[in-house]
Every structure is written in structure tokens, then in C-alpha cells.
Amino acid sequence: MRRLFPSLALGFALLGAVATAQAEEVGCVSTVWKMLGPDHKICIDAFEDPEVKGVVCHVSRARTGGMKGAFGLAEDTSDAAIACRQVGPIEIVGDLKDGEQVFTERRSILFKTLQVVRFFDKPHNTLVYLIYSDKLIEGSPKNSISTVPIMPWRE
């Protein structure tokens, strides 16, 4: 059993790395200097909705630094914001399901994730993106939304 835990931890760390590979880092700012390990930061990433071509979302969230942050053992806060925009002609690939997960990122070694889900507001022809974090036992009510009205695109 002792050998199993490090293997599981490594597996979860790799899964988190795969999930964040979908996003491209735009930039970070330091919020607290740490003598040992990386500083606490606020980072911005960009990702494209895999089911809706022509939409890009930018997500900002806190990243815990220090030694725990350096080794992936810190639990990041639930503070996050999202802004999504139409950047080209919108093309919906497949069927959109309300509440469908668009992006996910590990926020602690095992129990907490940051998620972006999409809804389609048909009466207003608008895509709605919701960012929130959940935890195995108790999630957080902190959330943010961004809307993208589906408009004709002129080149």
C-alpha cells in the first residue's frame, strides 16, 4: 500500500497536467512573494471551446505558491473569472448539451477541480459559460459567467 500512494499521486498529477494542456497561458502576475518556491500568482489562460468553433474563453484564477505550490500539494482558492468572446464565424460541431464540461483543471492534489461548463440559451441565441470549483465533499458558491451572443461574422 505504501508504494501505491506515490503512484496514485503521480497519476493524478499527470491527469491534471493533461487537462491544463488544453489551455495556453497568456500571463501571470505575482501577488505574494515567497522566499521558498514560486510566488502566489494570478494567471490567465486562453482556450477554445472544442464544440463551438469561433469562441475563445479567457480564465483567470489564483495559483498558490510556496513549497506546497511547487510540489503540487497546495489547494488553490476557488476565486476565478471568465470572459468568452466570438473571434470568428461560429460553427457548432455536434449537439450541444446544457451543462456540458468545456474545460477542467485540478486545484488540489486529489479533491478539488475548476470547471467551465456551457449552456445554450436558445430563446436569445446565446452561449453561456459558467466557471466554478467543486470539491469531493463541499464545493464553493464562487462563480462567474460569460455570454457569447451568436452573431453573423463579417470578414
Image: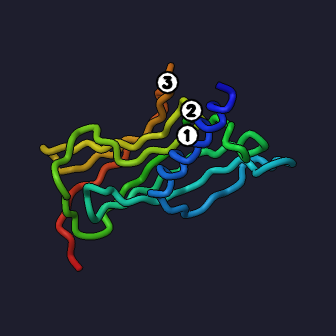
Disc with the residue nearer the chain's start (2 vs 1): 1
Q: CA distance from mark 2 to mark 1?
A: 7 Å
Mark 3 near mark 2, Cβ–Cβ under 8 Å? yes
One can see residue 68 in this view: yes
The x, y position of residue 74, in whole percent, is 68, 37
Q: Residue furthest right?
A: 35
The x, y position of residue 140, in whole percent, is 50, 27
Kind of residue indicated by mark 3: Leu
Residues 105 and 82: in front is 105
Within 10 Å of the Cα at label 2, are there few (<14), some (14-19), or many (20+) other Cα atoms? some
Q: Which one is closest to the eye, mark 3 or mark 2?
A: 2
Disc with the residue nearer the chain's start (3 vs 2): 2
Q: Residue furthest top?
A: 137
In which quadrant of the rendered image does the N terminus lie?
top right
Q: Which one is closest to the eye, mark 1 or mark 3?
A: 1
Location of mark 3 (residue): 136
Kind of residue indicated by mark 1: Phe
- Asked which quadrant contains residue 93, the reply is bottom left
Mark 2 near mark 1, Cβ–Cβ under 8 Å? yes
Location of mark 2 (residue): 110
In which quadrant of the rendered image does the C terminus lie?
bottom left
Kind of residue indicated by mark 2: Leu
Residue 100: assigned label: none
Within 10 Å of the Cα at label 3, are there few (<14), some (14-19), or many (20+) other Cα atoms? few
Q: Is residue 13 left or right of residue 49?
A: right
Instruction: Identify the element where label 1 is drawn.
Output: helix
Disc with the residue nearer the chain's start (1 vs 3): 1
The x, y position of residue 109, in whole percent, is 60, 36
Instruction: Identify the element where label 3 is drawn.
Output: loop
Location of mark 1 (residue): 12
Which residue is rendered at x = 21% and y = 41% of the image?
A: 97
